[in-house]
Amino acid sequence: QAQVVESGGGLVQPGGSLRLSCVASADIFSAVTIGWYRQAPGLEREMVATITTGGTTNYADSVQDRFTISANNAKKTVWLQMDSLKPEDSAVYYCNVRRAVTPRYSYWGQGTQVTVSS
């Protein structure tokens, strides 16, 4: 059964750093785009950063130059390094594994809470 599991969230002070991890089961980690999304209370879920299994990355403007997404395909793991965190980065962060070609699928993890506060 396909699994996507996030970890690494927590409480950090403004200006601090956190590293989130997303581990996916091997059967869904082929020719996919892995994305980190976040959702704050009362707001819609938004894309933070994505990476393809080919290594192409994309970032939201709000996190460009502060966050870095990376992947190890052999370990089926994607990381989101978050530096210079701001209170507005506080949200539940979700990992998504999406395949746009047949067989198409999209799997979400359960989310991990990130709180940036002094």
Image: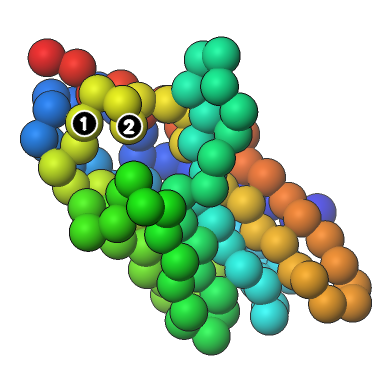
Q: Secondary structure at mark 1?
A: loop
Whether residue 90 can be seen here: yes
Q: Residue at x 53, y 85 (%)?
A: 54
Direction from residue 112 to residue 100 in the image, left or right:
right
Which residue position holds label 2?
A: 89
Label annotation for residue 86: 1
- Tag 1: amino acid: Lys
Q: Residue at x 66, y 59 (%)?
A: 97
Identify the amino acid type marked 2.
Asp
Q: Nearer the viewer, residue 15 or 80?
A: 15
Q: Position of residue 60 (x, y in %)?
A: 42, 53
- Tell me if 57 is positioned left or right of 87 in this view: right
Please state the horizontal and vertical placement of residue 21, each as a whole percent of the image.
41, 51
Residue 79 shows up from this direction: no
Q: Is residue 22 or residue 12 the one in the foreground?
A: 12
- Name the residue: 13% across, 24% down: 13
Q: Residues within 10 Å of mark 2 (few under 14, many from 20)?
A: many
Residue most extreme to the front: 61
Q: Position of residue 48 (x, y in %)?
A: 45, 49
When asked about the image quadrant of residue 94, the answer is top right
* Label 1 Cα crowd, 10 Å radius (few <14 / some 14-19 / many 20+): some
Q: Is residue 88 left or right of residue 37?
A: left
Q: Which mark is residue 10?
A: none
- Residue depicted at 55% across the width and 40% down the height: 46
Nearest to the observer: residue 88 or residue 24: 88
